[in-house]
Image (tube, helix red, strand yellow):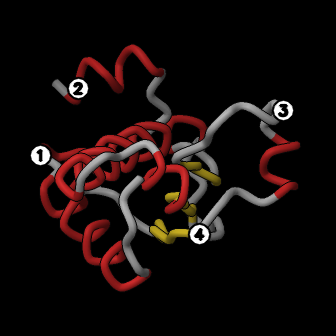
Amino acid sequence: MVQVDDTQFAAMTEAALNSLPGVHARSISNVAIVYADQPTLQQRQQLKLRHNQTLFGLYEGVPLSQRQGQTRLLPDKITLFKLPLAAASNSLPELQENIRHTLWHEIGHYYGLDHSRIHELEN
C-alpha cells in the first residue's frame, strides 16, 4: 500500500487527466472530478457491492449517449476513491497508473461506452 496525502492525490489526479490521450479526455464538459477516501455506504448499496468488492472510481450522471439533446442537467461527477487505489498500489508510479486507468474508465462511462469499448480505446 502506498501512503499519499490529499494534496499528493489531487496532484496525481490532475496529472492523470492531463496525460490522457485523445479527444475523449479533452472534450469532457460539465463534469466534476473529485476524490474521497472510500465509497459511501449508499454508493456501495446502490451498486450492490458485496463487502469484499473494491471500488476505485464511480461515474454519476447521465451519459452523453442517453441525454437526447438535453442540455440543462446538473454537472456529472467522477469520484476517485483514494484508499482502495492506494491499497492496490505498491509504488507511487503504480498508483499514478491506477489513477490514470480508473479516471479513463469513468470518463468512458461519461460517454456511455461499454467496458469492451473503454478498454479498446485505452490501448
Q: Earlier in the sequence, mark 3 or mark 4?
A: 4
Relative vertical location of residue 103 with respect to residue 109 in this rendering, above or below: below
In which image quadrant can residue 50 be found?
A: top right
Question: In the rendered structure, which amino acid carries the disc numbered 4?
Answer: Ala
Give left or right: position of 105 versus 83.
left
Amino acid type indicated by mark 3: Lys
Measured as percent of width and height from the top left, residue 107 is found at 40, 46
Residue for badge 4: 36
- Mark found first going from the N terminus, 3 or 2: 3
Q: Secondary structure at mark 2?
A: helix
The residue depicted at 84 percent of the width and 32 percent of the height is 48
| Closer to us: 19 or 64 | 19
- Residue 48's label in the rendered image is 3
Q: Can you identify the residue that label 2 sits on? A: 121
How crowded pointer 4 is (Cα within 10 Å; few <14, some 14-19, many 20+) is rated as few
First in sequence, mark 4 or 2: give its number.
Answer: 4
Q: Nearer the viewer, mark 4 or mark 2?
A: 4
- Distance, label 1 to label 3, CA atoms, is 32 Å
Q: CA distance from mark 1 to mark 2?
A: 10 Å
Do labels 3 and 4 touch, CB within 8 Å? no
Task: Give the vertical position of 61 relative to 119 (above or below).
Answer: below
Q: Is residue 100 left or right of residue 123?
A: right
Which amino acid, by three-letter code, is at mark 1?
Answer: Pro
Tell me how far mark 4 sits from mark 1, CA to CA: 25 Å
Q: Position of residue 81 (x, y in %)?
A: 54, 58
Decide which of tag 1 and tag 3 comes sooner along the chain. 1
User: Tag 3's secondary structure?
Assistant: loop
Q: Which residue is mark 1?
A: 21
Cα distance between the residues tagged 3 and 4: 19 Å
